Amino acid sequence: MIPIRATYRFQFHDGFTFADAEALVPYLDDLGISHVYASPVTTAAPGSTHGYDVTDPTAINPELGGEDAFRALVAALKARGMGMVIDIVPNHMGVAGDSNAWWQDVLRHGPDSEHAAVFDIDWRERVVLPVLGAPLPEALANGDLALERQDGRWSVVAYGEHRFPVRDADQADADSVPLPELLDRQHYRLAYWRVANDELNWRRFFSINELAGVRIEDPAVFEKTHALYFRLHDEGLIDGVRIDHVDGLTDPIAYTRRLRERLGPDAWIVIEKILAAVEPQPLGWGVDGTSGYDFMEQVTALLHDPAAGDALGALWEEISGRSASFEPEEFQARQDLLSWQFSEQLDACVAAFHAAAPAGITAAMLRRAIERLLWVFPVYRTYGPDAPRGDAAIRAEARARVDELIPPGEAHVVDLILSWLAGDGGADTADAVRRFQQLSAPIAAKAVEDTGFYRYGRLLSRNDVGFDTERMGMAPDDFHALMAGRARDVPRAMLTTATHDHKRGEDTRARLAAVTMQTTAWRAAVLEWLERDDGGVDDADRYMLFQTLVGAWPEEGATPDFVERVTAWQQKALREAKLRSSWEAPDEEYERAAAALVTALPADAEAIALIERTVTMLDEVAHANTLAQVLLRYTIPGVPDLYQGTEFADLSMVDPDNRRPVDYDRRRAALRDGTSPKLRLIAELLRWRRDDPALFERGDYVPARVTGPDTGHVLAFERHHDGRRLRVAVALHGRRPDAATQVAFAGGHTADGATLFGAGSIWYDRA
């Protein structure tokens, strides 16, 4: 195994293949990267731009170049002493269209299919396929469904493109049977797309009908879906994996331990897991840590001045008429999503608990208790008695939060559910517990990240995946405690500040973080923006648009490309919020009004002047924030990841904007010429990591002692290993400490603020 020093994330698709990545290996080597970190490489839905809709986990995607091209890429990496890490997707598979042979076989053969055990299907009824644009009788009357023969087999075809296999028993006489009768014979039921939330009888990924849940807990399914990964590892082609959405699995801890057993002690294994503020690192799971959302939250919070929370909260409340706190938004969003998008899963969960409940506890009581727990559950999910650190604190927090919501006389029902989550119910309650755990995770994700974050706009840089939005900022002492914990517990966890799933780019967040140092001037700029013609758009939406424009504003200004990107963000934001519009029922008139605010920008000199003036006001601190988070990402205990293209300013918005093509010619030139301060700092720190890997991999973390007027605005620490040491200091929140601020490092070195920060906001050295 090649030691993992630093990773570089590539998003592979048919427009960026293994061959394209191979051509960039010399650049990555020059930069100092040790490993390519690849998005899923297995066969995905045709034209997939991300790879998480896997259709065949046993083969490398031919659209990316197939296995030969993958091997060529790995060979190019190994020739330079580099390696490969891949993203794997054990939780679900893509089932849209007819490209997934396993799913098609299940539709053809039903529960007798050799692949039936792969998918989490309730076989008490036929597989519900919510693919129709109208109820079935109406679709039949409209001629939307037809019977067609292809390659000697009959299929049902919807809208001339979606094919569904006719079961073997009906092949001989399919064309002589009325279509409604033929459909009734199949192992599936074609249904109106709007019934999915209420009638779907198979687990899906969140609320996405095109992604079917996989029963990875079945040992045979585990082996079947992981055979390719094991072969690639055993042949030395990959050095590790990142596990997508581990909390969607029936038993994440058992899965990761089994994977560790198969891959061995040297493989690098990290998990995509959202850690709540009350949740510990995944110790005892057999993994090296998380994929870094927790670090992204911690370093971003550090860059925000906590003192600005009240002022910005009051401004949001004044503008929107909504709460200054995120808590009510999250509560309402959880209620909405549980009712709107997960009612079938809730029904199944209630039924499972009722089947195991003692006499005197009704299904209605259980429904009320489960609903209320899910409205306030403090984490994605629990893990039961196998959790190395236990779930007791999390269950206690859930009990405290739900207390005031419990109907009179029904507290014992809540307590029963929580005791079963602790494992007290044994095997008889395992199915009920599984269903609760696989419901609490998507409720948290969809309600918080994909709804609440689009409704709440106190400061958008604090609304991102895994963030504690209620908290405006983090004090240096709190950050130190967390980093010391990393050095002790998870020194090989991933450190990231940008991903394919972030809501806004690392430098967009860095710029908006600067608002917390200038709240009075920011308020004036915002009110000036809101004094303009609203075009029929709500003030809250206009305020969030202003934040987005300021945060993502490029040097080139309101170019056609930028206008198009922001317009796309605006539409997605409105639909995800589900207040003025939605994906299910778009309010196109309101969306056009909102889009007009953006499309009018190029001709609106006054608006552009306001935006550019605001950006200029923030820029000095924003630049300091950018360099601070780069410095910390590459010096804190852990494995730093560099998301594709973010060597330059990352002023991206939510996907698909954060997955745009990258101009590597410019980055190669800048690396050669040293013209980009951000890239120059990354390259220097990667050289240090290459020169002294043991210091960065095994060095401790010792906070420096800061005294003087800027105590709460300086972060400084030291790392040591085998006689080597690294010292780092960062001036936060736009401060430039002077000689009155003293920094005492653990090794005996003391310096004042003027010495450390006389030339800039960051300082670092090693010896």
Image (cartoon, rainbow, N blue to C red):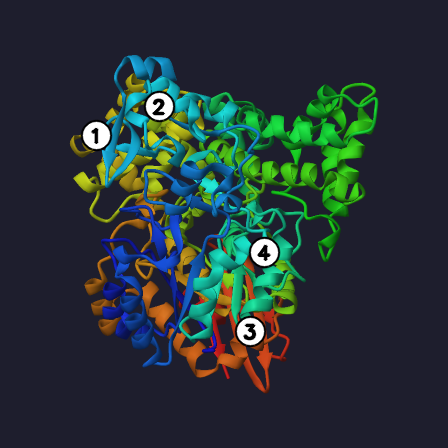
Front of the two marks 4 and 1: 4
**Crowding at label 3, few (<14), some or many (≥20) Cα neighbours within 10 Å?**
some
Front of the two marks 3 and 4: 4
Under tag 1, what secondary structure? helix
**Point 73% across, 56% down: residue:** 389
Q: Amino acid at mark 3?
A: Ala
Tell me which numbered mark, 3 or 2, is placed earlier along the sequence.
Answer: 2
Under tag 2, what secondary structure? strand
Instruction: Tell me the number on the disc at residue 219.
Output: 4
Residues at discs 1 and 2 in contact (Cβ within 8 Å): no
Viewed as shown, does residue 392 lie left or right of 716?
right
Front of the two marks 3 and 1: 1
Tell me which numbered mark, 4 or 1, is placed earlier along the sequence.
Answer: 4
Instruction: Tell me the number on the disc at residue 599.
Output: 1
Q: Amino acid at mark 4?
A: Pro
Cα separation between marks 3 and 1 = 52 Å
Cα separation between marks 4 and 2 = 35 Å
Front of the two marks 4 and 2: 4
**Point 59% across, 50% down: residue:** 275
Instruction: Tell me the number on the disc at residue 132.
Output: 2
Q: Is residue 383 visible?
A: yes
Cα separation between marks 1 and 2 = 35 Å
Instruction: Tell me the number on the disc at residue 751.
Output: 3
Cα separation between marks 3 and 4 = 58 Å
Q: Position of residue 642 (x, y in %)?
A: 39, 62
In the figure, 188 relative to 556: above or below? above
Under tag 4, what secondary structure? helix
Residues at discs 4 and 2 in contact (Cβ within 8 Å): no
**Point 48% across, 82% down: residue:** 692
Q: Amino acid at mark 1?
A: Thr
Viewed as shown, does residue 88 lie left or right of 423?
left
